[in-house]
Amino acid sequence: MTETNDTVECNDSKINDSSANDEDIVNPWDVRSSSAAGVDYDKLIKRFGSSKLDADLLERFQKVTGKPVHHLLKRGIFFSHRDLNVILDRHEKRQPFFLYTGRGPSSESMHLGHLIPFILTKWLQETFDVPLIIQLTDDEKFLWKDLSIEEANRLAYENAKDIIACGFDESKTFIFSDIDYIGQSSDFYKVICRIQKSVTFNQARGIFGFSDTDCIGKISFPAIQAATSFSASFPFIFNKRSDIPCLIPCAIDQDPYFRMTRDVAPRLNYQKPALIHSTFIPSLQGAQTKMSGSDPNSSIYLTDTAKQIKTKINKYAFSGGGDSVEEHKLKGGNCEIDVSYQYLKYFLEDDKRLSEIYRTYTSGELLTGHLKKELIDLVQVIVENHQKKRKEVSDDVVKRFMTPRKLNFSF
Amino acid sequence: MTETNDTVECNDSKINDSSANDEDIVNPWDVRSSSAAGVDYDKLIKRFGSSKLDADLLERFQKVTGKPVHHLLKRGIFFSHRDLNVILDRHEKRQPFFLYTGRGPSSESMHLGHLIPFILTKWLQETFDVPLIIQLTDDEKFLWKDLSIEEANRLAYENAKDIIACGFDESKTFIFSDIDYIGQSSDFYKVICRIQKSVTFNQARGIFGFSDTDCIGKISFPAIQAATSFSASFPFIFNKRSDIPCLIPCAIDQDPYFRMTRDVAPRLNYQKPALIHSTFIPSLQGAQTKMSGSDPNSSIYLTDTAKQIKTKINKYAFSGGGDSVEEHKLKGGNCEIDVSYQYLKYFLEDDKRLSEIYRTYTSGELLTGHLKKELIDLVQVIVENHQKKRKEVSDDVVKRFMTPRKLNFSF
C-alpha cells in the first residue's frame, strides 16, 4: 500500500489511463491535479469504472447496520466503491467477510492523512464485527525507495505502533509485514504464485505503467498486495476457506492493484474483493497535491508538537479567504479550496459545528485566523491523544498483533 | 532448475543469443542441435563466455584434492566452468565454500540424465567435505507448466526421494522446496527481494528471452534460483555470513541463471558462484535433443523395469554401427554418434573397459548388438540399485533432509 506518495524513482511509471494531458494523475505512486479544488473525483469514477457511493447506498448502509453512517462516509470523503452492496447483502444474511487495509511503511512518522483509512476501518470493524487484516508492504517500499530491506522492515514495526494506537481490537486484528509473513507461511506464497501465473507483463504494464527499465521485483509486486484480498492467504484465520470475500477501505490511488485483483479472482476460484475509496487529504499548500510524507511543509505529522502544528497551519495552510479582512467580510471565503476547512471536514466529527463554520466562513463572518484556530485546537488534541496512545503500545503488543493466530471468530 | 526439458508453453521464450539460425539452441527451456553429434560445446563456451575445463585445470584439481578426478570430469562430460580455480584456491587455503545444485520437479519419475549432476555432486561433497544445498524449484514448475501448485510441491518431495537415494550425507545436506522454504525463512525472501531490485525487465529479457506475454511470475522467478547461490539465504547453516561462495554443478542450459547471479553478486556484496557445466545426455534417438522426461521413448526412467530398459535400448538407442554386419565389420562403428556408447561414457566407470569398447567398436570387431548388451546390463544394475535405495528412503528421512537445520560444519 502506498497511501502516501513520496516516491521519486517512479516518475517513469505512469498508469496508462492517467497520463492524458488534461486529466488528473492518480496512481499508487503519484497524485496530481492542475485544479485548485483538487482531483475531479466524478471523472475518476468514470475513468476507473468504479461506482459512486451515493445517498441511496448510504441509506441502505444505515438500514443494514442500524447505525448512523460515519462522517467520513456521510461527507463523501469515501466517495466511490466496488461491490459494497455485495458486502451489505452478506452482512444482512450473516455471511462472513473480512476487512483488509494496509500501509506502505516508507517513513518513521505517519501524517494526519495516513489516519483516514484506519479511522474508517476501525469504525467498520466495530460496526460489522468482522476480522481485520492490515498489510504493511515493507517489501514494496524496499523495491521502490532508497531503503535497505532491514530499514523498510523496521519502519513496518514503527508504523504498526501508530496503527495499533488507532484502537483496533487485538482479538480481531492481524497486522503483518510482507517480509516477515511471507517467511512464515507457504499458504501466502502459494496464493502469490497463483496470481503471478495469472497476470502477464503486458497486463501489469497496462495497469501500472511499468517500463522495461523497472526492476523485476516491481513488476511482480502487485501480486503480493493482491494476495491479501484472498482468505486462502490466512488459513489460520479462515480455516482454509477460500470463499470469504473482503472489503477494502483505501485511498483511490490504490484501486489499480484491486482492479487487477478482481480481474484474476474468478480464474483462481477466489472471491472478488469489494472496495470503498477515499479522496486524498490535500497538502497544506492546497488540493493540487496530497499530503506527502516526504515534504515536511506539506504535512502535519503524528509526531509534531502542539507548537509545530500551530506554526504549520498558520504559516502554510492554503486559505480560501479574502486577501484582506475587508475583502473577506465583503466577498466571504471559499471552503472548497480552503485547506483548513477541508481538514475540518475530515476530522471534526460535530456536524452542526462544521456546517456553522461552513456558513459563517462562506458569508465572510468567520475570519481565516479564527478558522485556523479552530483547526489548530482540534488537530492538537487529535495528535496529542494519538501520541499518548502510541506510547502505550509496547513492543510486546506489536508482536501480539503481528503473530499469525486464530482471531476471535469461527469460520 | 530445469535440468530436464519438457516445457511446451515456453516456445515463445528464447534466449536471445541462442536463436541465430545455424546455432544450437541451449536455454533452460529448450536444447536442440541440428548436428548428429549434438551441441557444439566448444562454440557454446565461446557464446556463453565460460571457460573450458581443460587438462591443466583437471591436473590441478587432482593435485589439490589428492585424488583421481571423477570420470564425469575426466571424460569431458563436465566440460566448462566459471571460477573453478577460485574454489580450488579456497580448498587449498582451507577457506569454506558450499555446493549448490537442484532440480525442477516436473515429473514423478526422473530419468537417467537427471542423475548426472547428482552423481558428480555426491563425489564433490565427499572430496571437499563441504555443505550441500539442493533446491527443488516447484514454484518454477508451477509457473511454467500445466500443474497445480500442490502437485508441483508433491513432485518436489517425490523427486527428493530419488535424490536422497543417490547417497548424500544427511548431516551435510539441506534439500528444500522453494514453496516450503520461502514460507519458512524471511532471510531467503530478503535475498530474493535484493536480487529482484537489482535486475530490470530489460536485463531479464536479454538473458532469458522473456516476452511481454509471459506472466509476471516467470519474469521474477530467476531471482529465486539465483538466491540459493548466496550463503545469506541460509543463516542456520552459515551463521549469517554472506562471504561464503558456492560451486554449482549443473547442465549448461542452467548457465543463464547464474550469469545473472554473478552479475548482481558484487552489487549486493555477495560472493559470485563458481560453476562446472555438464553436457546433455542424448535422447535415445540421438544427440540432436537431450533425454526428455516428457517423451517416454527418448528416456530411460529410474522407474523402468529391466525388461523395459532392454526393449528401449534395443529398439530406440540410435546406432553408430554399420547398416549390416558385413558393412560394420568392414567400416567399423562411429562412437561419436552412437547413443549406447555415449551412455557408457556417462555411466561405465571402468576406463579400461570403456576404451576397449571404443577400440573394438570403432574397428568393427564389436557388433552393435553386443555393445547394446553391455549397456543394457549396466543400466539394469544402476536402475535396480537406485530403485532399491529409493525404497529405503522413508518419508521421515525426506523430512529430515528438508528441515532447515545446522549442518555438520562450523562457519
Image (tube, coloured by chain):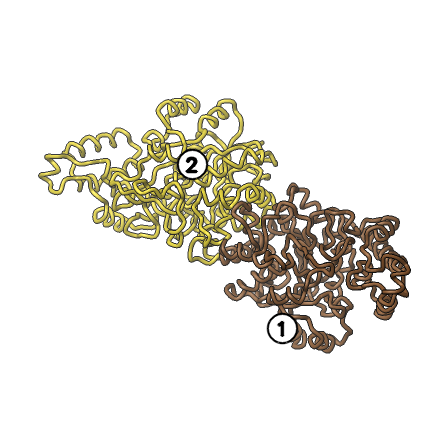
Chain colours: A brown, B yellow
**Between A298 and A61, which is closer to the camera in this rendering?**
A298
Q: Which residue is mark 2?
A: B249
The one nearer the camera, B136 or A161, is A161
Q: Position of residue B347 (x, y in %)?
A: 31, 37
Asked where in the image residue B266 lies, by quadrant, the reply is top right
Q: Which residue is mark 1?
A: A86
Q: Amino acid at mark 2?
A: Pro
- Seen as rendered, the residue at the extreme left is B326
Specify few, some or many for label 2: CA neighbours under 10 Å numbering under 14, 14-19, or 20 or more. Answer: many
Residue A345, label in figure: none
Which x, y percent locates residue A37? 73, 61
Report the chain holding disc 2.
B
In this rendering, is residue A65 above or below B107?
A: below
**Horizontal side, residue B18 vs residue A222: left or right:** left
Q: Please state which amino acid type lies under the numbered disc 1.
A: Val
**Front position among marks 2 and 1:** 1
Q: Residues within 10 Å of mark 1 (few under 14, many from 20)?
A: some
Q: Position of residue B87 (x, y in %)?
A: 47, 28
Foreground pick, A266 / A307: A307
